Image: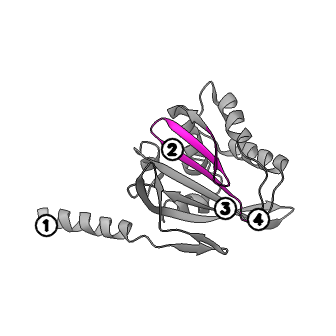
Amino acid sequence: MKRRLLSAALLLVAQFTSAKALQIEGVNVPAQTKVAGQTLPLNGAGLRTVTIAFVPIKAYVASFFAPTPLRTAAAVTPAAGPLQFNFTFLHSMGQGQVTNAWNAQFKSSVTSTYPGLAADQAKFVAMFGPLKNGGVETVEIEGNDTRVYDNGSLKGTLPGRDFQKAFLSLWFGSNPVQTSLKSALLGN
């Protein structure tokens, strides 16, 4: 019995530590990244599409990094972290479009709410600027802090576990931004 458990544990570790870099829609997704000095393997990555006037538009490639494999939505929220999300945009977007896109995602997908969410959402969204094709927005979760990077530049930090739960619910809640993207980020 102990041998089977050890074999299963080693297989899981081997599968996770052998994460490979991916290429999705021409975007190179690395096999790992570093957050606060800790190496995080790629948990999963996928493509976000948006349908406008019945035409699917490839919007961005999302990648999710975690210290241990997170293969179910239930495993993500209580994860100790650190965690990192990268969003590489496939089209240029003006400031208004970026703001509208984030606000629309929160409105349609957030399932973990709290009294100060509207104020925190406004602060979060204000940290992002216009994007060029290939522009990257990064969100890091470490401890109780959520750090926001816009094209590699730290734009600010939001304190509080409540905001982290709300942000994670966008991707892994009961009404995710995109079901296929949720599955891809979980490595399924």
Can residue 149 be found in the magenta stretch?
yes
**How many marks can you see?**
4
Amino acid carrying label 2: it is: Ile
Closest to the camera, between mark 2 and mark 1, is: 2
Give the residue pinned by disc 2.
Answer: 141
Give the residue pinned by disc 1.
Answer: 3
Amino acid carrying label 3: it is: Thr
Gap between marks 4 and 3, in whole Å? 8 Å
Asked if marks 2 and 4 touch (Cβ < 8 Å), the reply is: no
Q: Earlier in the sequence, mark 2 or mark 4?
A: 4
Gap between marks 2 and 1, in whole Å? 36 Å
Residue 163, percent across and down? Answer: 57, 35
**50 vs 106: above or below:** below
Closest to the camera, between mark 1 and mark 3, is: 3
Amino acid carrying label 4: it is: Asn
Give the residue pinned by disc 3.
Answer: 88
Gap between marks 2 and 4, in whole Å? 25 Å
Can residue 165 be found in the magenta stretch?
no
* Label 1 Cα crowd, 10 Å radius (few <14 / some 14-19 / many 20+): few
At a point 71% along the width and 41% down the height, the residue shown is 125
Residue 153, percent across and down? Answer: 65, 49
Q: Label 2's element?
A: strand
Q: Which mark is residue 98?
A: none
Q: Earlier in the sequence, mark 4 or mark 1?
A: 1
At a point 87% along the width and 62% down the height, the residue shown is 53
| Quarter the N terminus occupies | bottom left
In this rendered view, identify the residue nearer to me: 102 or 141: 141
Residue 159, percent across and down? Answer: 55, 32
Q: Which mark is residue 133?
A: 4
Please state if 121 lies on the left or on the right of 42 as rendered. Answer: right
At a point 47% along the width and 68% down the height, the residue shown is 31
